[in-house]
Image (cartoon, rainbow, N blue to C red):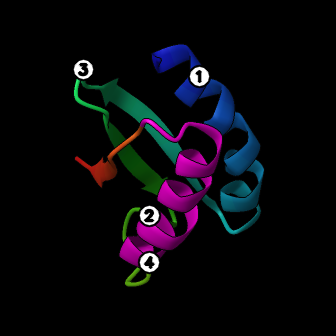
Amino acid sequence: MKEKVEKALQKIKPMLQADGGDVELIDVTKDGIVKVRLTGACGGCPMSMMTLKLGIEKMLKEEIPELKEVVTV
């Protein structure tokens, strides 16, 4: 499952990088929780939770429906 998530994140990264940010995959748990770290401009952005939930989580769940949640660490 980790490989699927990494592949899906590669599609999301260019959008974040265009704004000076990025996302790093930390772990995917057995129960479908994806742990990521937002870096660059995304790391300190006040809108980062919206980016995480409405952007990254939504796109990952569309590609990998068995995922439950995306959280930042």
Give the distance between the C-alpha atoms of the residues marked 4 and 3, in whole angstroms.
Answer: 25 Å
Residue wearing tag 4: 50
Cβ–Cβ below 8 Å for labels 2 and 4?
A: yes
Q: Pointer 2: what residue?
A: 52
Label 2 vs 3, first from the N-terminus: 3
Measured Cα–Cα span from mark 3 to mark 1: 14 Å
Q: Amino acid at mark 3?
A: Lys
Give the residues in magenta: 48-66
Q: Residue furthest front?
A: 66
Disc 3 packing (10 Å; few <14; some 14–19; many ≥20): few
Which residue lies under the disc numbered 3?
Answer: 30
Picture coordinates of residue 33, whole percent (x, y):
28, 38
* In-image side of 11 versus 24 (left or right): right
Amino acid type at mark 2: Leu
As drawn, 12 above or below 26? below
> Which residue is labeled 1 in the image?
4
Residue at the bottom extreme? 46
33 horizontally vs 64: left or right: left
Q: What amino acid type should be assigned to the residue bearing mark 1?
A: Lys
Q: Earlier in the sequence, mark 4 or mark 3?
A: 3
Q: Is-magenta flag for residue 64?
A: yes
Q: Earlier in the sequence, mark 3 or mark 1?
A: 1
Give the mark count: 4
Q: Which mark is residue 67?
A: none
Q: Secondary structure at mark 4?
A: helix
**Residue at position x 37%, y 71% from top?**
44
Residue at disc 2, secondary structure:
helix
**SS class of the residue under badge 3?**
loop
Evaluate if marks 2 and 1 touch, with contact meaning CB atoms under 8 Å apart.
no
- Can you give x and y, in whole percent of width and height, for residue 52 in the image? 44, 64
Q: CA distance from mark 1 to mark 4?
A: 23 Å
Q: Amino acid at mark 4?
A: Met
